[in-house]
Image (cartoon, rainbow, N blue to C red):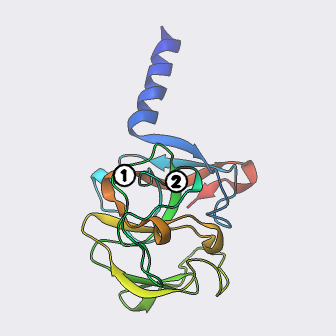
């Protein structure tokens, strides 16, 4: 009886409160390494809005599974994808929010330019991409639609993110990553 109760409680906590995730790719290096494990707060966005700088787990738009980038509208040269495909993939991604609803965004040297201001990392490190890298320089602005967020991996040259598949609808957010628990030498907060 006690084992069943403990198992039931653990499943409820994972389903509604806090869920562990394993990092599947190098798109968030050096912040998060492949295989590292994070804890994700699944209920926080019921009480507060997501904001730039948050590291979040989400379902990407349909058509983005397994690294295939698909923009929901014809992509204009020099411009980030402005529209995601409808629906959501079953995969889960982890990225950093760099812009929110109503913000204008372009990309210069792998750094987001939000509302005309280049956003430098604040309290975290990124791996910039070279000037010739795909998605590193997208000087034509888009406006992030209401209820959407623009995601980028911290490893800018190796991240399949909103630059290629568009702003993410808020309802596809699973939660905010708040800490790492594996491997032991990387235990800490985000």
At x 60%, y 73%, the residue is: 156
- In the shown orientation, is residue 43 left or right of residue 79? left
Of the 4 image quadrants, the one containing the C terminus is bottom right
At x 48%, y 85%, the residue is: 78
Q: Where is residue 46 shown, x and y percent of the image?
A: 28, 51
Depicted 149 relative to depicted 177: above or below: below
Question: Which residue is at the far front?
Answer: 74
* Disc 1 packing (10 Å; few <14; some 14–19; many ≥20): some
Label 2 sits on a secondary structure element that is: strand
Mark 2 or mark 1: name the one nearer the start of the chain: 2
Depicted 75 relative to depicted 181: above or below: below
- In the shown orientation, is residue 159 left or right of residue 8? right
Q: Where is residue 110 shown, x and y percent of the image?
A: 57, 81
Question: Which residue is at the far bottom?
Answer: 116
Q: Which mark is residue 172?
A: 1
Q: Which mark is residue 6?
A: none
Q: Where is residue 69 shown, x and y percent of the image?
A: 52, 61
Label 1 sits on a secondary structure element that is: helix
Q: CA separation, marks 2 and 1?
A: 11 Å
* Disc 2 packing (10 Å; few <14; some 14–19; many ≥20): many
- In the shown orientation, is residue 26 left or right of residue 56? right
Tally of numbered tags: 2
Q: Where is residue 43 shown, x and y percent of the image?
A: 35, 47
Near-viewer residue (103 or 157): 157
At x 40%, y 40%, the residue is: 17
Q: Quadrant of residue 140?
A: bottom left
Q: Which mark is residue 93?
A: 2
Near-viewer residue (122 or 102): 102
Question: Which residue is at the far right?
Answer: 185
């Amino acid at each position: 009886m006690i084992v069943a109760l403990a198992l039931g409680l653990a499943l409820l906590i994972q389903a509604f409160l806090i869920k562990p995730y394993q990092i599947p790719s190098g798109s968030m290096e050096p912040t998060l390494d492949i295989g590292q494990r994070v804890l994700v707060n699944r209920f926080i966005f019921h009480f507060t809005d997501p904001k730039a700088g948050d590291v979040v787990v989400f379902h990407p738009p349909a058509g983005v599974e397994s690294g295939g980038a698909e923009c929901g509208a014809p992509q204009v040269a020099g411009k980030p994808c402005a529209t995601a495909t409808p629906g959501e993939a079953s995969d889960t991604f982890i990225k950093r929010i760099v812009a929110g609803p109503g913000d204008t965004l372009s990309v210069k040297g792998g750094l987001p330019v939000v509302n005309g201001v280049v956003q430098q990392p604040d309290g975290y490190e990124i791996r910039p991409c070279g000037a010739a890298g795909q998605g590193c320089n997208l000087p034509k602005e888009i406006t992030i639609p209401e209820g959407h967020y623009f995601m980028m991996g911290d490893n800018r040259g190796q991240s399949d993110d909103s630059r290629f598949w568009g702003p993410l609808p808020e309802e596809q957010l699973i939660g905010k990553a708040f800490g790492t628990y594996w491997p032991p030498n990387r235990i800490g907060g985000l």
